Each structure stands twice: as C-alpha cells, then as structure tokens.
Image: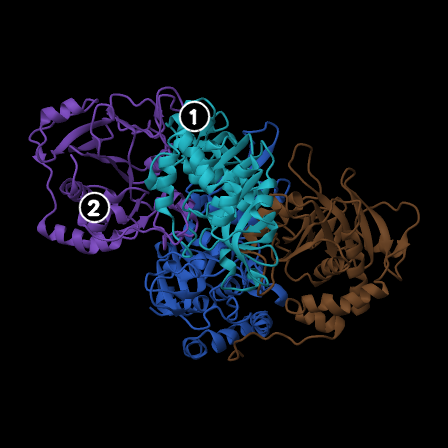
Chain colours: A purple, B cyan, C blue, D brown
C-alpha cells in the first residue's frame, strides 16, 4: 500500500491505539526522528482533546529538552514516558525487534543504522506501539537475526511495559505479552486474512471476526489537514507537502552549498 | 587557531567522540580531519553520529567505532559506514543510546561504573564483555546492567560562541557539557568570539561550558554546516541528501570530497 | 495560586527537599509553610540547607532531616536546628554533599543505586545502613560505596520566571533541574510570569526546567528573600544575621515569626 | 592570636604551601564558603604568577559553575581539583577531621553543622590544606569523636591525596600520610615549641630546627592590599573591611527587611 490515503489511515489507526482506554494512560508521548506518521497520530489524539504532552525528539528548533536525548532517556527511566514508537528491520512473532542488521553480528549481510535507544525504551516506557509500513516475510520473521530489544522479559526482570500493538501497511496486530504472541486485530481496507497470513513470516492468532481498520472520520480529516499539519510542518515539511500538499521545503540558512 | 590547526591536535589512532547531527556536530572540523589525512581514529558516537562520522569513515580516517547508530536521518542510511563494514574495513561495537550517556556520566562523576535499567535481553549485552549484569545489591533477584565509565581522549563539537576566558556557549545542548566533563580533551569550533566572561552574565551562564573543560577552540563561521546551529542556521537537508547520494559510490564520495572537503573549496565554503 | 496555596499542597508528614541558601532557596515558601502550621515534615537538604530549614524546625514543622549540613553561612550555626537536636525533638540523618547529589541523580536516571568514590573510612557509612559497600565489579579488591536512589515526595525552590507552559527559569542553577527531575512533585515560587514558551527561545532555554517536572507555581515577588536571586537581588546578610541572633532563644524566635512570618506582616513584606 | 597582622601571616603561610613545588601541582584550587583566608592565599599565589584556576564556591554572582556544588564534586571526582581546604571541629593526630559534633552520634554534646562534602573531597582531591585558627586541646585532639573524613585510608581504597599540612593560629604542621602523623614545620612569631606542645592534644614529631613562619613580603603585602582585596571584596566584604579597611558591606537589594 502507498499513497496519502493510506498514510491517513495509518495515522487514524495509531491515534485510536493511543486513546485506547484499556492501556496505561498516555500523558506523555515521545516520538523519534523520521516518524511523521506516529507524530501525526499523537497530534491528532491531542487535537481531539486527549491530555497528552508530546516530545518530538528531532524538532530542529524549540525542542522540549535541555539535555538532548539524555533527558528523554532519563524521563523514560523515571517512568515519565507513557508511549513510545519503535520500528524494526525485522520484527518477530514474540515482538522482538532487530535494528542492527541481518547475517552474522553486527550485520554482515545487510547492516542497518543500529539499535538507537530501543533496548532501553522498550523496557522502561509504559507502552510501545510498533510501526513498520512494509509488511512482508522479510520484515515480519519467525525469529529476528539479532535482538536489539526483546519483546518480553523473564519474570524478575525490571520492565514497565510491552508492545501494545504492531501497525503495518496491511493490518493492526495486538500483542499479548503474557503469551508473547500477536493476534490480528484489524485488516486495512482491501486486505484479507489470507493475504496477511501469506505476507507474515511469524505465526499469530486470529480470534473471531476481524474488523476493517477505520480511516479518519470527517472531523479527524479536518483536524489532520488543519491544526495537525500546522503543528508538523516545521519538523516534517516533506511529509506535509506529500500528504496535505502544504508547506515549502526547509532548505537551511546556508546557501552556498552545492 | 584555525580549524585545521585544531584538527592537527588529534593524533592518528586517537579516540574521538562525536555527536548526533541534531546536537552541534562539528562539520567543518570533520572536513579538516579529512584534509589532514587522519588515520586509525577510534570514534565514539554520543550516543549516535551521522554526517561527520560517515565522512571520516569514507575518507579512510577511522579504524573502529562504538556507537548506538550511524544515520543520516531523513537522508537515510550512512553509505560509507555501511560500505566499510561490508568490506571488513571497520570494527563496530554496538551500543544503545542511554548506555553511551551513562558511560559518560560515570566518567563525569569519576566512578568506575554506573547501572542502567532496561537492555537486559538485548543481544547487545552478549557482544559487550565490558557490560556486566549483577544482582541489584538493594533487591535480591533483580538483575541490573552495569556499564564502565568512558572518558574519551578527545571530544569535538561546534558552539555558538567562545569568550576571552575560553568558555563556550552551547545553549540548551547541555548534554555537551556532560561530554566535555567526561572527555580528556575537548576541541570546540565556534561561530564567533565575544568579549569578557560569559559566566559572569546570568543570562548566558546556563548555556556555557566552562573553559576548564575546553582544551582549544577555533573560529569557523558556519562551522556546523551542513548541520544546523540552534536558531542561527538550519540543518541543510538538501546538502546532506546530496552527500548521501554521492557517497553511495567510491567515485561519488571522491567527487564530494573534491567539491566540499579539499582545502581550497572548503576555505571558500567556510 | 499564591504562596500560601502552594504551601497547602504539602501535607503534614511529607518529605520535602530544600536547597542551600546560595541556590534559590524559597524563603517565602518556607514562611508560608510555617503560617499553615505544617507538622511532621521530613526534610532533605540537597545537599545542605539553611535559613528555610532552620525556620521550619524552629516553628515545629519538622520531624526529621537528612542533610550534609544545616548552616546559616557567614551568620554561623543554625540555632533552631542545634536546639531541636539537643532537645531530642529532631531526628538527623547525616550525609555528605556529593552523596545527596548522587542519590538524586540515581532517581533522575531511574536506577536503584549509584556508586560514589571517597567516603569510605568516614563514620557516616557506619550510621547509614542504606549505604552499601561492594567490591567494584570491574576491579577486584577495590571497595566502593553504593547509594540508593532518592525521589523526594516534594521539592521546593524559587525561580526567576514561569511561562504560560508551566516552564520555570532557574538560570545557571542547573542542579535544580536534577532536583526537579528526581522529585515526585516540584513546587516552584517565581518572581514573575512571562508570556509564551521559554523553551522556544534559544537564549532562555538553557536555564529552563520544563513544565513536565513542575507540579505548581506561585508568583511571589522577592520570594527567595532573605536569600538572593541570581543578579536580581542579593543575599540579605543583615537579615540572616538578625535571624541568627533572634533564633538563639525561644522568645527571640517567636519575635522573629511575629515580625516576619505571621500572615499580615508577611503579606506586606512579600 | 587575632588581628589583621595574624590574618596576613596565615595568608602568606598558606600561599607558600600552595606554591610548594614538592606537592601535586596546583592548577585548580577550590575554596568553600566562609573561608576568606584560604581564598586570599589562593589569590595571592595566583597574583604572584602561579597558573591557578580558582573556583570560589559561594560567590554570590558569577560563580564558575552551572550545576552548583554538584559540578564541584564532579570535578573533584574527575581528578580535576588539585587543592581544597578543610577545617574541623576536631582534628586528630592522624589527620581525621570531625565536622559533626562531639558526644554521641550525631553530636549530642555539641552539634556542628555537618560534614558537608568533606568525606568525598578529602579522598578525591590531590591535596588538602587543613586550616583551623583555634589551636587548643579541645580542637586538636588525640582522637576525634566522629570521623567526618578520614586522614588516611587502608591500602586498596581509592584515594588521590591527603592533607599536605595543618595551618593553625600558632603554627604549621606538615602531614606524612605514610606514617599518619604530623610534624611541626614552622612556629608563628611569638610561639614556642613548648607552647604549641601544650596547646596540642595529639602527639606529633619535631624534626630538627623549627623555623618561624614567614609573614608576607613587602611585595606580597602590596598585592594583598591591592588586587587580592579587589578580587575578594564582593565575596568577603566583611573580611576585606576588617583586614584592609576597604569596601562597603553588601546589604542585598531588598530594603524592606527589619
């Protein structure tokens, strides 16, 4: 799936997970770099009235921290970050994530940037939403080649939270940490149970009827195109232009380059 | 002292800590290290690093790196890092961001180690013989990670101002103070110099790193470029995208160096 | 919210961290706690405390204190602290300054303990069952002290400014950021409020403690007095000397409270 | 002893200890609150040309730190503080110091303010100069009632430095950490070996001839009354007025008090 309607669907699906009243309440959500869809989902939840503090790690100016990412990690260590987003080069059926690479350590087949703060945040934050648009057997694997951050931890290991869900370009999976297992929650429009099963390298549950992932309501669409886009345009100019046709690319103050 | 003289202070084989592309990374200093032909550097990403690191790796300056990631952000993967690793020319020691901060904080406090929550169950631990798991002395049956202090031989970053006392102003980027406190020598490029002592000014003082932690400074206008400097100039996404594109190949990387790193061009650009 | 409303947020028996007289100690807030008749407070000196602590002890608000010292600086001993201890009315747990900082830093990082060099051989250790000596896991035969994290129920200090987002500006007093990070609730009196969001201003941001760490603020002009506030007003040594003199006796202390703490007078003074 | 000439003598004696080439070189000296004599000695050494960075902890404005005393302690932890000054309610012959009080713990007979950072600084700083003007058997005791900070440490205990000397109102003692014992170094003018022995509660060595403590030279006196006083007047107005007859008392900006 690709295109702007898909992105809006993903934003709406994630916003719904954020405001899900069954989980740990989200008072403070942090969003890493290069994550415009999760950021938009957080803004949407906030613009809908949820009392959420948003910390966008890589705002070029006016970011909320005075000690850089150390402050984010300290906040998480204190238990003050309720929600974080993680992706993965590979994600397996036990919600382990791999940001290192494939092949032998440290990624001799394909090397990716590295683990960032995942090994810490996944255990110290109250809720994590896993997000990876590519939904294919090479991403969603039976077992990750390397565990950057574990999906579950043995009893006695300090851990505040787990994956709440995994959102992909095809569906939403819920995660049950007690069973270390995903269950299909909703299928994005046009997707089938069989198609998702075929595209997923790990086993998971399908319990009863599977609903279709709902896109944004009319009110949500208006919020997204208006105040959400306004809030995001400085940090994610390319995204805002592509999805809402708004904004100019920030070029930086230095003109002599290239 | 100019930026090339500053870069000359870093001997071949030195351990050098660099910062992420959103944290006053010293672009001009990295290019000066390439110009001087540095070799065998042992880089440390605090906690990750980007353009400067990829450039140094591409130019053959780097033997090894400890970091939580190397990334060009929106411009994608760091191509010379990836290529060097695939070619077996770079030794990588993987970490996770708060572990890097914690190792520096241990050095800042002068203690041999500090604990950190999380991380247990990550394969990182198995590949880090210097990371230890102990039973929390305050609660039996509670395993916790210990990390050894790290005091980098050199740290380098770009600040907005230096004053007559050798103090530098990094504004809200207070994590650089920890880096400077922990490092044996801090080399700082600055956008400009100002008169007096910034620590005597209560409005400036909170963003100052005291001269006691600064070994040497050099003035370089646009010294962070293509990285941004607070509200003075933005991150040059177009240039980093151009770098990412050229650096995909050896020839393209050579072209990049010829255009943007070699002495004459760099002088004009900086 | 006024300072008396702020003080009302601290229930009897609460743990309350206070700061030294050179670190934005909240004089008006302490007087408001006395006016409200707080009882059974468990004070924490971070790392020491002075006027506010002695006043609260004298007014019978305090059951116990953990601190590295109680001092009125140039004005000498803290007379009500000394008297309460001699009368057996105050439980004192002695510490050493960097241990207090370290305990807060452990809480700030969310770890159960942190190590600290030094201190071994001090009798403090024998009187602190919560301090542990372990063998350095990185070097056998190297004993090192561990200190447990401390996350005070409340912290209170006086800042120069608050903004519309609940951020407060403490300038160079960045150690207060650690206190706010570590504490469960931070109550902050401020000299004045300003429009907007100070974290969006790169010149102000380095001295800001973000609103996420601030539970409530109250505007009190000269709210640090008799303590000083950065370059805005100085430490009132004459007044502290007067306090030190009056507080030597019960009657003198009562006179001090009548003149400077009781509601009507305090209103006029603040 | 009392009076301004005595204070100038003590300043000169301490300055001589600071610049003593035999010890760990002093590049960075820190001086705590309420210590005008050590501060003046540091300024004097600096004004005489020694390359010393001075950190005065309690300067009301423009102090060198942005993280308060934590930064001082971290500097010491890093090994970057070469010289510090400590006093003591009691000091014993093994250079143990007591800042807690006398009688049972925590000072049931006489309680003093507390240990401050002494337990840390004494072990992490390269050199400590002990300074206590009162030289009497109640201060200089055979064994302190409580050890705030130990004069020596067993082998294997991390420790960078020890007391270099103890300066009192009567004399200067040198300290030998290997033997955990003081030796009389110089006698202040007018003092005798016997008088000092009688006023000292602990045993110590007297090795050979004992010189008289030298006061400031003419050049030092000029530096003290001029640039040293200029540098100190904001932090120690009372002291500068008393010793050099200079300066006005700082009263603070708030006038309504008292």
Residue D233 visible in rendering:
yes
Q: Which mark is residue B175?
A: none
Classify the position of the C terminus of chain D by image quarter: bottom right
Which residue in the rendered view is the most extreme toward the top?
Answer: A104
Classify the position of the N terminus of chain D by image quarter: bottom right
Question: Which chain does the numbered disc 2 sit on?
Answer: A
Mark 1 and mark 2 residues within 8 Å of each other at the beta carbon = no
Residue B139 visible in rendering:
no
For numbered disc 2, what is the local secondary structure?
Answer: helix
Please name the residue that numbered disc 2 is placed on: A242
Rendered residue at 54%/29% (across/down): C137
Please name the residue that numbered disc 1 is placed on: B85
**C-alpha separation, residue under disc 1 versus residue under disc 2:** 34 Å
Question: Which chain does the numbered disc 1 sit on?
Answer: B
Rendered residue at 59%/63% (across/down): B196
Q: Residues within 10 Å of mark 2 (few under 14, many from 20)?
A: few
């Amino acid at each position: 799936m690709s295109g702007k309607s898909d992105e809006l669907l993903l934003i709406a699906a994630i916003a719904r997970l954020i405001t899900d009243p069954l989980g740990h309440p989200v008072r403070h959500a942090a969003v890493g770099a290069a994550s415009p869809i999760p950021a938009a989902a957080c803004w949407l939840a906030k613009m809908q009235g949820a009392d959420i503090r948003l910390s966008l790690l890589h705002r070029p100016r006016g970011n909320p921290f005075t000690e850089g990412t150390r402050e984010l990690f300290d906040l998480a260590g204190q238990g003050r970050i309720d929600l974080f987003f993680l992706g993965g080069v590979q994600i397996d059926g036990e919600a382990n994530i791999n940001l290192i690479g494939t092949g032998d350590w440290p990624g001799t087949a394909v090397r990716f940037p590295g683990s960032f703060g995942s090994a810490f945040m996944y255990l110290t934050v109250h809720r994590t939403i896993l997000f990876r648009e590519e939904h294919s057997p090479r991403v969603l694997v039976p077992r990750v080649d390397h565990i950057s951050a574990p999906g579950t931890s043995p009893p006695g290991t300090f851990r505040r939270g787990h994956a709440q869900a995994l959102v992909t370009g095809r569906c939403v999976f819920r995660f049950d940490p007690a069973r270390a297992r995903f269950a299909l929650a909703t299928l994005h429009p046009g997707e089938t149970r069989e198609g998702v099963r075929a595209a997923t390298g790990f086993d998971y549950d399908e319990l009863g009827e599977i609903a279709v992932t709902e896109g944004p309501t009319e009110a949500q669409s208006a919020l997204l195109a208006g105040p959400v886009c306004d809030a995001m345009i400085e940090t994610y100019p390319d995204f805002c232009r592509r999805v809402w046709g708004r904004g100019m690319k920030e070029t930086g103050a230095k003109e002599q380059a290239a | 002292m100019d930026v090339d003289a500053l870069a000359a202070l870093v001997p071949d084989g030195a351990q050098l800590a660099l910062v992420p592309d959103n944290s006053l990374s010293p672009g001009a200093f990295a290019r000066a290290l390439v110009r001087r032909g540095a070799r065998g550097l042992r880089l440390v990403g605090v906690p990750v690093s980007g353009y400067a690191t990829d450039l140094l790796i591409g130019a053959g300056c780097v033997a090894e790196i400890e970091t939580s990631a190397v990334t060009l952000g929106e411009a994608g993967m760091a191509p010379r890092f990836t290529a060097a690793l695939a070619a077996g020319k770079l030794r990588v020691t993987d970490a996770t961001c708060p572990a890097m901060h914690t190792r520096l904080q241990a050095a800042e406090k002068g203690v041999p180690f500090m604990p950190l929550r999380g991380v247990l169950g990550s394969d990182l631990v198995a590949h880090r013989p210097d990371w230890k798991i102990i039973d929390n002395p305050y609660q039996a049956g509670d395993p916790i990670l210990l990390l050894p202090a790290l005091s980098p031989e050199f740290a380098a970053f770009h600040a907005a101002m230096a004053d007559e006392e050798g103090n530098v102003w990094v504004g809200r980027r207070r994590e650089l103070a920890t880096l400077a406190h922990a490092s044996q020598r801090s080399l700082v490029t600055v956008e400009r110099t100002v008169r007096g002592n910034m620590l005597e000014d209560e409005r400036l003082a909170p963003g100052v790193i005291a001269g006691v932690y600064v070994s040497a400074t050099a003035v370089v206008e646009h010294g962070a470029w293509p990285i941004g400097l607070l509200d003075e100039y933005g991150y040059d996404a177009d240039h980093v995208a151009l770098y990412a594109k050229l650096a995909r190949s050896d020839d393209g990387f050579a072209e990049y160096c010829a255009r943007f790193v070699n002495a004459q061009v760099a002088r004009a650009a900086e």
